[in-house]
């Protein structure tokens, strides 16, 4: 019987690509818009708190190495109803994930190929056609083969790491001048106090 296993690098890349979604630019932009410069503090606090969830999940999945642990562990700890609810929540998140990723790709692509999105953010006719093609390609990639999916995921994860690092370095190189403040903030550190952070 053919055993379906993943190598450690493939698992690492799968984890990284799950963390680095298409919203890495939008999340930073919207957080800075609401919290101002205090957005950095919000990211640090959020990262610190999410470590507790990650450590607990890592311990539980090590204790119970079973397939579908996201639904089975709540079933073991809280009963069948909670396991059932978690399975539906995860199913709905998986169903909505592909259209969200396609929408993110189209938002980025609209900069290079105008006419995919309307002014209000909705899709035009060309946008719907591009979205349908992207959905078919993503579905075929997910259904076709685990090996193909892992190989393409490894490549995409490397791109997801290189592109933000490259953009950050370009921005730093473009704006950094020793001894000068290029862009001074027009407001206080937390312009809306704790409500915006």
Image (cartoon, rainbow, N blue to C red):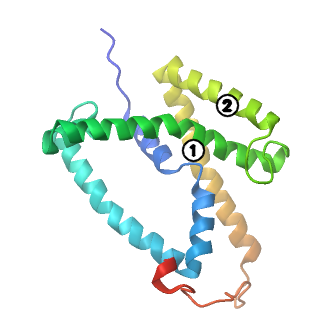
Q: Name the residue at 70% across, 91% down.
A: 179
**Residue in front for this viewpoint, 70 or 154:** 70
Q: Name the residue at 50% across, 44% down.
A: 17
How far from the left and from the top, in percent, is residue 159?
61, 45
What residue is disc 1 on?
Answer: 158
2 or 1: mark nearer the eye: 2
Q: Is residue 147 above or below residue 68?
A: above
* Location of the N terminus (image quadrant): top left
What residue is disc 2 on?
Answer: 134
**Residue in front for this viewpoint, 52 or 96:** 96
**Left or right for 155, reference 146:** right
**Residue in front for this viewpoint, 191 or 138:** 191
How far from the left and from the top, in percent, is residue 20?
52, 50
Q: Is mark 1 on a helix, strand or loop?
A: helix
Q: Is residue 93 above or below residue 54?
A: above
**Left or right for 78, reference 48:** left
Location of residue 173 by image quarter? bottom right
How far is the residue under mark 2 from the one under mark 1?
A: 20 Å
Q: Name the residue at 65% across, 43% down.
A: 103
How far from the left and from the top, in percent, is residue 61?
22, 42
How far from the left and from the top, in percent, is residue 85?
29, 40
**Left or right for 26, reference 89:** right
Q: Name the residue at 58% across, 53% down.
A: 23
């Amino acid at each position: 019987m053919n055993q379906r296993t993943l190598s450690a690098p493939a698992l690492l890349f799968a984890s990284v690509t799950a963390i680095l979604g298409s919203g890495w630019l939008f999340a930073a932009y919207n957080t800075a818009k609401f919290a101002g410069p205090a957005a950095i503090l919000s990211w640090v606090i959020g990262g610190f708190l999410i470590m507790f969830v990650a450590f607990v999940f890592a311990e539980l999945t090590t204790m119970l190495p079973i397939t579908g642990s996201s639904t089975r562990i709540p079933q073991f700890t809280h009963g069948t109803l909670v396991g059932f609810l978690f399975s539906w929540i995860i199913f709905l998140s998986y169903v909505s994930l592909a259209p969200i990723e396609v929408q993110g790709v189209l938002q980025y692509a609209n900069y290079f190929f105008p006419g995919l999105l309307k002014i209000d953010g909705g899709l035009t006719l060309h946008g719907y056609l591009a979205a349908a093609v992207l959905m078919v390609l993503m579905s075929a990639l997910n259904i076709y083969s685990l090996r193909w999916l892992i190989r393409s995921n490894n490549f995409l994860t490397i791109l997801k790491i290189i592109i933000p690092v490259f953009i950050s370095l370009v921005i730093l190189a473009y704006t950094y001048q020793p001894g000068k403040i290029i862009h001074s903030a027009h407001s206080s550190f937390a312009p809306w106090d704790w409500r915006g952070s």
